Image (tube, rainbow, N blue to C red):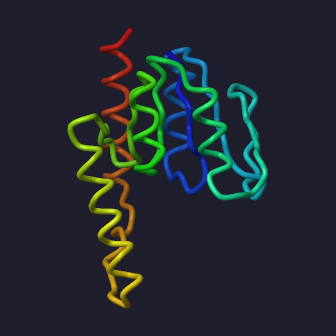
């Protein structure tokens, strides 16, 4: 089991990395070249800036039982069939029973925006959001060992 982090726009990279260190799990951080992430514990992989470049790299690295941290529904939908566990920045695990609805909602919102309608964005991140993510991921790691 490893933790793989989709670090482009990920507000919980440090939390996930700290848990990887604490529980001695390998950690891979993937981001595009616009992000300057350095760490002596994790393997940091930088990819060219391009549509889905980081996602394709992550998919090539993922193995069954890896934990992927991402807020990208599309990436999550491709990681689940590989046997990975996928968690978002709010401590919510994606699974086969929920991913289709999330993708459909994303598609509908995109169509609405194309049609000129405004859709509500995510609310401002709070300390409680980070705490919830940390607790859920920690509990999952402990239960999975």
Instruction: State the image quarter where residue 84 is shown.
Output: top left
In the image: residue 58, left or right of residue 48 = left
Residue 56 percent coordinates (x, y): 63, 41
**Residue at image x 21%, y 37%?**
97
**Residue at image x 58%, y 34%?**
59
Which residue is outermost to the bottom?
116
In the image: residue 17, left or right of residue 103 = right
Foreground of the two, 56 or 145: 56
For the C terminus, which image quadrant? top left
**Residue at image x 40%, y 50%?**
73
Residue 66 percent coordinates (x, y): 48, 22
**Residue at image x 38%, y 38%?**
87
**Above/below status of 126 relative to 143:** below
Instruction: State the image quarter where residue 44 is shown.
Output: top right
Residue 25 percent coordinates (x, y): 55, 17
Instruction: State the image quarter where residue 82 is shown.
Output: top left
């Amino acid at each position: 089991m490893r933790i793989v982090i989709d670090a482009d726009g990920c507000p919980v990279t440090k939390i996930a990395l700290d848990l990887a260190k604490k529980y001695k799990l390998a950690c891979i951080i993937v981001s595009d070249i616009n992000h300057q992430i350095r760490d002596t514990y994790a393997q940091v992989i930088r990819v060219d800036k391009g549509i889905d470049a980081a996602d394709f790299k992550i998919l090539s690295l993922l193995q069954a039982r890896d934990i992927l941290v991402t807020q990208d529904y599309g990436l999550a939908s491709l990681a689940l069939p590989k046997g990975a566990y996928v968690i978002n920045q709010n401590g919510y695990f994606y699974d086969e029973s929920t991913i289709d609805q999330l993708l459909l909602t994303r598609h509908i919102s995109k169509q609405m925006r194309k049609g000129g309608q405004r859709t509500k964005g995510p609310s401002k991140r709070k300390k409680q959001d980070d705490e919830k993510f940390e607790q859920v991921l920690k509990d999952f790691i402990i239960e999975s060992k």
